[in-house]
Image (cartoon, rainbow, N blue to C red):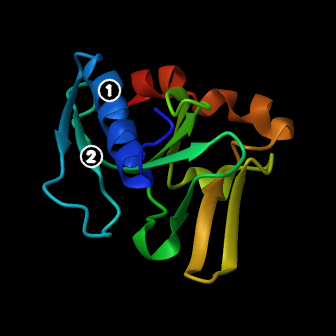
Amino acid sequence: MTDLTSRRCGDLAEMFVASRLLADPALEVFTTASDDGGGHDLAVRSLRTGRWYGVQVKATTRATHPFVYLRAFRESSDFIVAAVVLDEDRHPERVYLVRGTDWGDDSSGCLGRNDAGGDAGPYVEVRTGAAKYRESLEHYRLDVVVPTL
């Protein structure tokens, strides 16, 4: 399965996250008709809280950090970055759900922000590729966050 394009890996990651969210009967999950760079791959309605969430799914290998450009990022509790870490066969290995407001609250360093940006501009990142942040990322695990939605 290693010959999949990055676009196909992203599509698979989106469907994986959607299926994991759908496993919770209190969540309704909707896919977007197109990825226009607006920052939402999934829309989620919580029957538990009555809130809507926009979810941006980012898939990456173990060695790199998933990131979202600031132009598609919202520092809001109803904006969620789903960081999917893929194994060497590009199967989902770990999934973290990080609310937009968590970047302002994090003191561990596991959530990064680069306002100077790279070639394509400023971004935020989930530092999944660094072993020193593994413990700090535990409270963002999908199975920990989903019951709070």
Q: Splitting the image into 4 quarters, where does residue 49 fall?
A: top left
Q: Which is more N-terminal, label 2 or label 1?
A: 1
In-image side of 93 versus 65 (left or right): left
Return the mark for residue 21: 1
Q: Are marks 1 and 2 in contact (CB under 8 Å)?
A: yes
On the question of residue 77 being in view, the answer is no
On the question of residue 146 being in view, the answer is yes
Extreme-right residue of the structure: 132
Between residues 31 and 148, which one lies in front from this camera angle? 31
User: Can you say which quadrant of the picture contains the N terminus?
Assistant: top left
Between residues 113 and 148, which one lies in front from this camera angle? 113
Residue type at tag 2: Leu
Q: Residues under labels 1 and 2: Cα distance?
A: 10 Å
Between residues 104 and 142, which one lies in front from this camera angle? 142
Residue designated by label 2: 42
In the depicted structure, whether residue 117 falls above or below residue 136: below
Residue type at tag 1: Leu
**Classed neighbour count for the residue bearing mark 1: other residues with Cα under 10 Å, few (<14), some (14–19), many (≥20):** many
State the SS at label 1: helix
Between residues 132 and 100, which one lies in front from this camera angle? 132
